[in-house]
Image (spheres, rainbow, N blue to C red):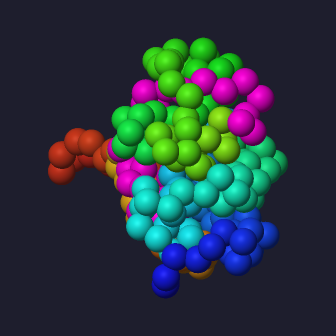
Amino acid sequence: MDQVETSTLDLGDVAARAGAAMRELLDIAAVPEGGLVVLGASSSEIRGGRIGKAGSAEVGEAVVAGIRPVALDRGVRLAVQGCEHINRALVVEAEYARAERLEVVSVVPALQAGGAVCRAAFVAADDPVMVEHVVADAGLDIGDTEVGMHVRFVQIPVRLATSEVGGARVTALRSRPRLIGGERAQYRL
């Protein structure tokens, strides 16, 4: 798909498909209320361009508009990953960062350093802070942003019916507790 002008991209469809992907992931991964999902998304990829080369504030806002209400409705916390230029720092609510004793870092995401989706999440949050790392229950990746570093082990790929948002591939993963022990170990009572 060639890069499309943001004005010709159906932003309502972007929001709807992003929201649908989040709902499906939450259902499949059984993320509990109060659990954490990490989101990474490239507005450039959604527009059909190459990651980091065609950012769009409007596309970022559409993604957040589709996903944030789903997370809020389900009582799930959302961490939104920034790009490599801010070392993949994440937007979270300040009260979550305090409760989890997360390391807050001093940066505000911008379109060219953090990315459009991260910036939109920062603006939409009630009391945003940026943190260096989280350990999420599941991850949603729109446009090959590689969110796996922020999802707890053991990670399991999730195939979603919503496989694309705009021109971006959608991938997801969930986690499960590690199975430990040897041949005598049991995993169910």
Q: Nearer the viewer, residue 51 or 5?
A: 5
Q: Position of residue 53 (x, y in %)?
A: 43, 60
Q: Residue at x 76, y 54 (%)?
A: 65
Image position of 91 with respect to 37: above or below: above
Q: Quadrant of residue 47?
A: bottom right
Q: Residue at x 66, y 60 (%)?
A: 59
Q: Nearer the viewer, residue 151 or 146?
A: 146
User: Is residue 80 in sight in this rendering?
Assistant: no
Q: Residue at x 61, y 17 (%)?
A: 99
Magenta span: 123-151
Q: Position of residue 98 (x, y in %)?
A: 60, 15
User: Is residue 123 in sight in this rendering?
Assistant: yes
Q: Position of residue 142 (x, y in %)?
A: 52, 63
User: Left or right: 62 with respect to 48?
Assistant: right
- In magenta stretch: residue 140: yes
User: Left or right: 168 with respect to 161?
Assistant: left
Q: Tag count in the figure?
A: 0
- In magenta stretch: residue 124: yes
Image position of 126 with respect to 31: above or below: above
Q: Quadrant of residue 43?
A: bottom right
User: Left or right: 97 with respect to 51?
Assistant: right
